Amino acid sequence: MAKAARKTSSRKSKSKVTGLSPAVLLRRARYWALRGALGIVGFYALLILMFSVVNPPITHTIFAEWWRLGEVERDWVAIEDMAPVMARSVVAAEDARFCDHWGFDVEAIRSALESGANRGASTLTQQVVKNVFLWQGRSWLRKAMETFITPVVELTWSKRRIVEVYLNVAEMGEGIFGAEAAAQYYFGVSAADLTAQQAALIAATLPNPKERSAAKPGDFMRKRARQIVDGAATIDRDGRAACFQH
């Protein structure tokens, strides 16, 4: 009995100290958690709207590589100042149905699940979301955030803008970011002067830019580049490049 009285007295003392009941504290915790979640949503919504017209100044990946290497190569160039074949090559290499989906390629996802492949279902939009708004690596949190942000980007940005941002933030060689920096580094020309073969070789560095070189392609890279040249011509001919070409 005495112990029960002491426990009751202790709880009352704690309540007096805080001045709040456990129920009120729980409601306040939920309130602040909701405000925090809404704040995060608002922050990302603002970034998505801003980057629909303003070029992202840096990304997590670019900063991480700069920190690791001491320097990176990057030169932002508008999509209209690049050879059109560069955009077609990247789309053909990474997401040939880009113009036909809303951010997720259901057919590619189904094929990847059936084959057990680790790669093959990520669209250009998902890659832009990962590069610009999130971080590299595999985690359920990043994947969940990517799943929520991707359709918002598709609704807010034009397809052409998605391709333009991708062409400027994707790593296309170790510490080499974007098509302009890749064109200068590998071939000594601007992205505007790339040939179909050169654009295909740059696109062929994806998704392993640290291990592949457009300047010194092996048999695999040459074969992949030929496939990309054919694919770029095909999506131009059959209309699958229409959504990002003017």
Image (cartoon, rainbow, N blue to C red):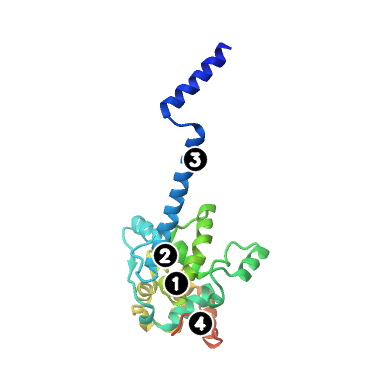
CA separation, marks 2 and 4? 24 Å
Task: Quickly name the residue at label 3.
Answer: 27
C-alpha gap between disc 3 and disc 1? 38 Å
Marks 4/3: CA–CA distance: 52 Å
Quick check: can you spot residue 6? yes
Which SS class for mark 4? loop
Q: Which residue is mark 2?
A: 48
| Dots 1, 2 in contact, CB < 8 A | yes
First reached walking from the N terminus: tag 4 or tag 1:
1
- Disc 3 is placed on an element classified as helix
Q: Residue at x 53, y 56 (%)?
A: 144
- What label sits on residue 241 in the rendered view? 4
Of label 2 and label 4, which has the lower sequence position?
Answer: 2
| Disc 4 from disc 1: Cα separation | 16 Å
Query: Residue 210, image x and y in percent?
Result: 44, 64
* Residue 89 rendering spot, x and y as whole percentages: 48, 79
- Tell me if mark 2 has few (under 14), some (14-19) or many (20+) residues whose alpha carbon lies within 10 angstroms of its own: many
Q: Quadrant of the C terminus?
A: bottom left
Residue found farthest to the top: 2
Quadrant of the rendered image containing residue 4: top right
Residue drawn at (54%, 66%) of the image: 122
- In the image shown, does 5 or 220 lie closer to the viewer? 5
Q: Name the residue type under label 4.
A: Ala
- Contact between marks 4 and 3 (CB within 8 A): the answer is no
Could you tell me how many numbered marks the image carries?
A: 4
